[in-house]
Image (cartoon, rainbow, N blue to C red):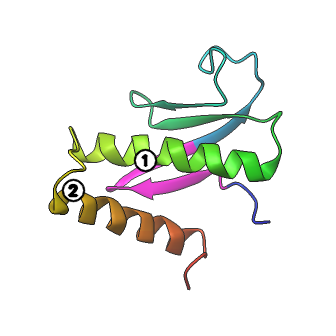
Amino acid sequence: MRKIPTSVWISGVNWRIRRVSDKHPKLEDATGHCCYRTQTIFLDKSYPTPTLWAVLTHELLHAISWGYHELDLTEETPVNAVAGELMNIARQLKILE
């Protein structure tokens, strides 16, 4: 399985991805956290990589929605924006080449 990246570009912003202890204050009993102020995604490093990929995907959607402010996923335009960002992320992670 592909290693968790340390950063990814979303909507022109470089988001850092940090694997941290489950005691990290940003996690507060969660497996992940998306900090908009610092453009950092925090992941609980005690979980196995497959679980972290699921958590990272969830947090990435938060980061994408931050980049597009107030996303309403009932309309086609925002859905296309999210799909485009997911494709960009997949290319960056070399999932799509």
Q: In the shown orientation, is residue 92 left or right of residue 48?
A: left
Q: Is residue 1 above or below residue 72?
A: below
The residue carrying mark 2 is 78
Please report the residue visible at 24 percent of the width from the left and 47 percent of the height from the top: 68
Which label belongs to residue 19? Answer: none
Please report the residue visible at 43 percent of the width from the left and 69 percent of the height from the top: 88
Residue 87 appears in which quarter of the rendering? bottom left
The residue carrying mark 1 is 61
Residue 48 place in picture, x, y as percent? 83, 45
Secondary structure state at the residue bearing disc 2: helix
- The disc labelled 2 sits on which kind of residue? Pro
Please report the residue visible at 55 percent of the width from the left and 37 percent of the height from the top: 41
Magenta region: which residues? 5-16
Q: In the shown orientation, is residue 3 left or right of residue 77?
A: right
Residue 35 place in picture, x, y as percent? 46, 29
Secondary structure mainly formed by the magenta segment? strand
Name the quarter where the N terminus is drawn: bottom right
- The disc labelled 1 sits on which kind of residue? Leu
Q: Earlier in the sequence, mark 2 or mark 1?
A: 1
